[in-house]
């Protein structure tokens, strides 16, 4: 098929390259001309395992193209995917200005029948707005061209996005038109070749809702476990054991019940807020969803609180080694990362930070923590330890899993570890004379 993907952010770029990998001819569009120039040269704006190689392979095969012109890439195109950003507006709702701008341009320029797919995470009812925006422009041009608007939300996880896209658990297609549904089925069929067909069809609004509900449910599991972790500490229970105890119940399951420093990233915080807002707009107070958010906001500071109760309110003269800055491993994404909250809290109190992250240094240093002069960046995890009062682990990158603990002892002023991701064995570290602080265990 001939596909156009509008927006070369996370979702657009991964979707575009995976569709081209399956032999479709794909043009990815972005208004950012520098980004498009770079992509043509194989320079990828984000770190995502496997993406660079896939983009380059398909550019070479001439199945993947990049352009700044939407106008030139709407003719004889089977499907156009809208994958532009939906940033959080000031009131917590998803801001649709980019989505609707794109819809308007599609209406202004389309010349042949086309299926328009909302791939960005958009609130219920957005497909209707997109349809109306396109129809309005067609009416202005006095044109009657057939088009359908389909919702096809993306469930990819950063750091594992290629895998998620190429071997999806499910693909959700919300469509009010049989022909459009069948075209989507044909597009996704190769992704299910060796397994059962996991394409789930439904009406457009239910598909739009599905994305928010999936993310809110996962966020709920995490906040629930973080709350349980905090209670475990108070009653001298070990949340690591409780987690295994409950996960073994197949109705509960082991995934997404890891307590930690709170969820971050581009999706959960934004989508939980937007769902709460949608409920409120419809006259419903979403108490549980609000609680999920409140627990998470507090959880981001739990490790900072442990540091303060160990070292005191005034951290002047204290230095902390931070291992991990990104919101989770295998990404350089710093959006809503717990590290931002912890670092701001500690430096506000006079503490100095020596930080290391395998991929997120650039993002942190030049953007998210820019101007915070109390943060110094290092090129290896061991370098951060020199003369530090404690090590604080905030992202569970694989290279932090089994460090040389003797080296930690040698470099740190005192052997103290604050572990915001419960990566180490409590009794082993205590036996080795570390002061070891975890989440959910006294
Ligand atoms: C998420 C969804 O998983 C994905 O389907 C959707 O399309 C986008 O949002 P992502 O934000 O990439 O993906 O990350 P994910 O792996 O889901 O982790 C989200 C956050 O939850 C991270 O901050 C992570 O550290 C945290 N988390 C996850 C926990 O604290 N505990 C867990 O058990 C699992």
Image (tube, rainbow, N blue to C red):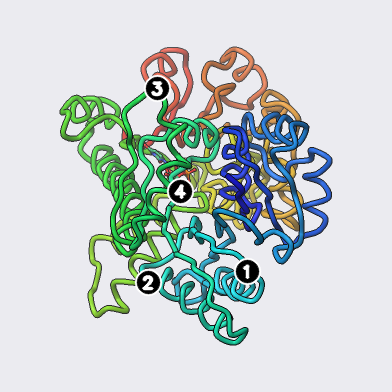
**Quarter of the figure that contains the C terminus:** top left
Determine crowd level at label 1: few under 14, some 14-19, many 20+ residues with C-alpha closer than 10 A: many
Residue under numbered circle 4:
154
| Earlier-in-chain disc, 3 versus 2 | 2
**Upstream in the sequence, badge 2 or badge 1?**
1
Q: State which quadrant residue 63 falls in.
A: top right
Disc 4 on helix, strand or loop? Answer: loop
- The disc, 4 or 2, on the residue closer to the chain's N-terminal end is 2
Pointer 1 or 4: first along the chain: 1
- Cα distance in 3D space between marks 4 and 2: 17 Å
- Looking at the image, residue 92 sits to the left or right of residue 66; the answer is left
Q: Which residue is mark 2?
A: 125
Q: Position of residue 105 (x, y in %)?
A: 64, 73
- Label 1 vs label 3, nearer the camera: 1
Number of the front mark, 2 or 1: 1
The label number, if any, that marks residue 194 in the structure image: 3
Determine if residue 323 is in view.
no
Residue in view at x 47 percent, y 34 percent: 164
Is residue 16 found left or right of 242 in the rendered image? right
Q: Element under label 3?
A: loop
> Which mark sits nearer the N-terminus, 1 or 3?
1
């Amino acid at each position: 098929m001939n596909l156009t993907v509008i927006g070369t952010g996370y979702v657009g770029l991964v979707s575009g390259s995976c569709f081209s990998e399956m032999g479709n001819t794909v043009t990815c569009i972005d208004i950012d001309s520098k980004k498009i120039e770079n992509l043509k040269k194989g320079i990828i704006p984000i770190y995502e395992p496997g993406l660079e190689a896939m983009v380059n392979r398909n550019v070479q095969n001439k199945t993947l193209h990049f352009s700044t012109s939407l106008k030139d890439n709407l003719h004889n195109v089977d499907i156009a995917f809208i994958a532009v950003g939906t940033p959080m507006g000031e009131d917590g709702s998803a801001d649709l200005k980019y989505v609707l701008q794109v819809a308007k341009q599609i209406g202004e320029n389309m010349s042949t029948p086309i299926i328009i797919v909302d791939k960005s995470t958009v609130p219920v009812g957005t497909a209707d707005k997109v349809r109306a925006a396109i129809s309005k422009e067609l009416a202005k041009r006095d044109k009657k061209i057939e088009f359908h608007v389909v919702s096809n939300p993306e469930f990819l996880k950063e750091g594992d996005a290629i895998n998620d896209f190429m071997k999806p658990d499910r693909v959700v297609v919300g469509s009010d038109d049989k022909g459009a549904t069948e075209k989507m089925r044909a597009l996704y069929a190769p992704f299910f070749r060796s397994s059962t067909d996991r394409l789930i069809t439904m009406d457009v609004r239910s598909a739009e809702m599905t994305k928010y509900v999936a993310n809110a449910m996962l966020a709920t599991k995490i906040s629930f476990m973080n709350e349980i972790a905090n209670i475990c500490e108070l009653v001298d229970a070990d949340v690591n054991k409780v987690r295994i105890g409950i996960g073994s119940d197949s109705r509960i399951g082991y995934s997404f019940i890891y307590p930690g420093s709170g969820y971050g990233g581009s999706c959960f915080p934004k989508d939980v807020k937007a769902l709460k807002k949608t409920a409120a707009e419809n006259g419903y107070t979403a108490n549980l969803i609000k609680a999920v958010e409140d627990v998470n906001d507090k959880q981001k500071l739990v490790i900072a609180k442990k540091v303060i109760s160990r070292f005191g309110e005034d951290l002047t003269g204290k230095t902390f080694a931070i291992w991990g800055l990104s919101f989770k491993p295998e990404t350089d994404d710093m959006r809503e990362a717990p590290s931002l909250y912890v670092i701001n809290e500690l430096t506000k109190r006079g503490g100095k930070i020596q930080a290391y992250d395998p991929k997120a240094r650039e993002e942190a240093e030049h953007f998210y923590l820019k101007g915070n002069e109390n943060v110094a960046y290092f090129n290896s995890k061991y370098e951060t330890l020199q003369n530090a009062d404690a090590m604080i682990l905030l992202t569970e990158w694989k290279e932090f899993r089994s460090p040389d603990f003797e080296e930690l002892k040698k470099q740190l002023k005192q052997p103290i570890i604050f572990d915001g991701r419960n990566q180490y064995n409590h009794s082993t570290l205590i036996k080795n004379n570390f002061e070891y602080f975890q989440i959910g265990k006294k």
